[in-house]
């Protein structure tokens, strides 16, 4: 009996097995790609502490007095997320070929940390900001990460800088916190960056409802200039992501509006003048329909034109709960209403105003918080909007107070996330 192949020709089975063995021998083990991991955090404390400006001072209004430290995390294509660090605040180092400088591979978040009247330090719904940053990052070919790990890093950062920059002796103040991700590295090619930097800074931020030092008290309410030919975002674009490319081009219209005495641009879209956003804020109107139904109306998220604002989401959720029929929060000035997310136009707002059905309008966002709108210039016509008691609409004032109570600890609420301090 023959037990081997005397002609020296391998069988199919032998060829397969030898091929597998050869492949295994030549395969190089792929390096493990690391996810963002806050448990590996390294902290280097600053030897020289920065000056903390007085609340509402010129230094605060200059918006350039960052806190003592910053978060820095590198990502590379071959290794993933490197060890996260909290380091002294200072300049970034990058090559002239860095992707963010050429191809807008950049995104960011805007959030605040608050010193409560109960002495505690709080974020407001930070998990929403962290999740949105992941979405924005992947929209511009930057890497994803576990948003819960970023939230842990943010808490560690403010645990370090919060006590000095938001002392318990000054409740009712806040810091603006800016996480950002940029394409970095030396590669100039038109492709996704092979190196990325995530960093986070914190800075005192002005209260835009208060006057600047030495300036007269501003008139209540924002004045908006409705856009004409310019378009901020479009269906299928990236208006829904918080990326720098949404902001730089809009500054042209914004600065022109400021020269004319307007605070922000009311961004309209299409020949029917669909209302989208006001500056970098979400826009709301309260009106009565022609059938007499009271509604809170804002643009929908479908179409990916507008940003899913954290304050927008919070306004909608609070309104559906506290402006519902039978709610204990209703007053003589505030009736129950329906919350509607739909496409609506400036023509409808103009018509409701002329027919006496417009109740009020306001914006929501991290920078302007909840601010009433007193006027809109549409087609070079100044439309004066109702302002409730003269300082703002009753609904906007109520929403603002409810949110402030959560942020500053006057109301115990799951949206107010307490930061443990040293």
Image (spheres, rainbow, N blue to C red):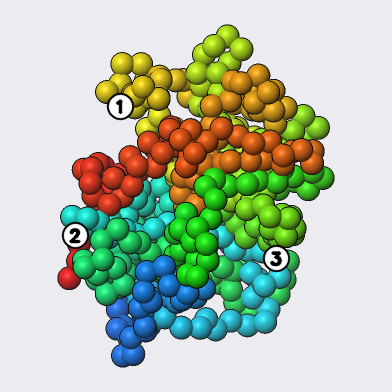
Label 1 secondary element: loop
Q: Earlier in the sequence, mark 3 or mark 1?
A: 3
Q: Which residue is mark 1?
A: 329
Q: Is residue 280 above or below residue 347?
A: below
> Compared with residue 199, is residue 2 higher up or lower down, i.e. above or below?
above
Q: Tag 2, which secondary structure? A: loop
Please identify the residue farthest to the top as the structure is shown.
291
Between residue 243 and residue 394, name the one nearer to us.
394
- Proximity of marks 2 and 1: CB atoms separated by less than 8 Å: no
Decide: is 420 above or below 331: below
Mark 2 or 1, closer to the camera: 1
Residue placed at 64% from the left, 69% from the top? Answer: 100
Q: Where, quadrant-wise, is the C terminus in this rendering?
A: bottom left
Q: Is residue 98 above or below residue 219?
A: below
What label does residue 103 carry, if any? Answer: 3
Q: Which residue is mark 2?
A: 119
Q: Residues within 10 Å of mark 1 (few under 14, many from 20)?
A: some
Q: Are marks 3 and 1 in contact (CB under 8 Å)?
A: no
Mark 3 or 1: in front is: 1
**How many angstroms separate mark 2 from mark 1 (CA)?**
27 Å
Percent position of residue 140, x then y: 62, 56
Task: Locate residue 271 relative to residue 88 in the image: left or right.
Answer: right
Q: Earlier in the sequence, mark 2 or mark 1?
A: 2
Callout 3: SS: helix
- Marks 2 and 3, Cα distance to the nearest angstrom? 44 Å
In-image side of 78 versus 327 (left or right): right
């Amino acid at each position: 009996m023959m037990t081997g192949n005397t002609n020296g020709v391998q069988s199919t089975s032998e060829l397969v097995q030898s091929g597998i063995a050869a492949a295994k021998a030549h395969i190089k083990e792929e390096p493990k790609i690391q996810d963002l991991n806050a448990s590996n955090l390294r902290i280097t404390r600053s030897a020289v502490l920065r000056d903390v400006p007085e609340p509402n001072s010129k230094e605060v209004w200059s918006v350039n007095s960052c806190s003592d430290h910053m978060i820095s995390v590198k990502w590379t294509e071959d290794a993933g997320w490197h060890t996260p660090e909290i380091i002294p605040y200072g300049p970034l180092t990058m090559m002239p070929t860095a992707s963010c400088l050429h191809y807008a591979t950049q995104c960011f978040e805007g959030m605040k940390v608050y010193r409560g009247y109960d002495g505690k330090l709080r974020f407001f719904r930070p998990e929403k900001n962290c999740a949105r940053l992941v979405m924005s990052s992947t929209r511009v070919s930057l890497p994803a990460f576990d948003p819960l790990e970023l939230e842990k890093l943010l808490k560690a950062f403010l645990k370090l800088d919060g006590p000095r920059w938001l002392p318990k002796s000054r409740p009712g103040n806040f810091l603006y916190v800016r996480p950002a991700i940029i394409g970095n590295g030396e590669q100039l090619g038109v492709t996704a960056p092979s190196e990325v930097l995530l960093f986070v800074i914190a800075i005192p931020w002005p209260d835009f409802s208060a006057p600047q030092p030495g300036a007269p008290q501003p008139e209540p309410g924002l004045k908006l200039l409705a856009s004409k030919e310019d378009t901020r975002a479009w269906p299928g674009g990236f208006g829904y992501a918080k990326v720098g490319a949404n902001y730089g081009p809009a500054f042209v219209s914004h600065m022109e509006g400021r020269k004319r005495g307007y605070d922000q641009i009311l961004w309209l879209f299409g020949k029917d003048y669909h209302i989208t956003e006001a500056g970098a804020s979400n826009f709301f109107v309260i009106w009565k329909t022609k059938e007499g139904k009271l509604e809170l109306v804002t643009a929908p998220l479908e179409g990916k034109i507008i940003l899913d604002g954290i304050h927008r989401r919070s306004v909608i959720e609070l309104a559906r709960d506290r402006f519902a029929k039978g709610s204990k929060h209703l007053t003589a000035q505030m009736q129950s209403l329906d919350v509607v997310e739909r496409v609506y136009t400036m023509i409808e707002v103009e018509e409701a105003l002329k027919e006496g059905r417009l109740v009020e309008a306001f914006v929501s966002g991290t920078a302007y918080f909840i601010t009433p709108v007193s006027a809109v210039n549409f087609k070079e016509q100044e439309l004066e909007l109702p302002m409730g008691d003269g300082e703002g609409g009753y609904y906007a004032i109520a929403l603002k107070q409810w949110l402030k109570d959560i942020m500053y600890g006057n109301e115990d609420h799951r949206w107010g996330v307490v930061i443990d301090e040293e």
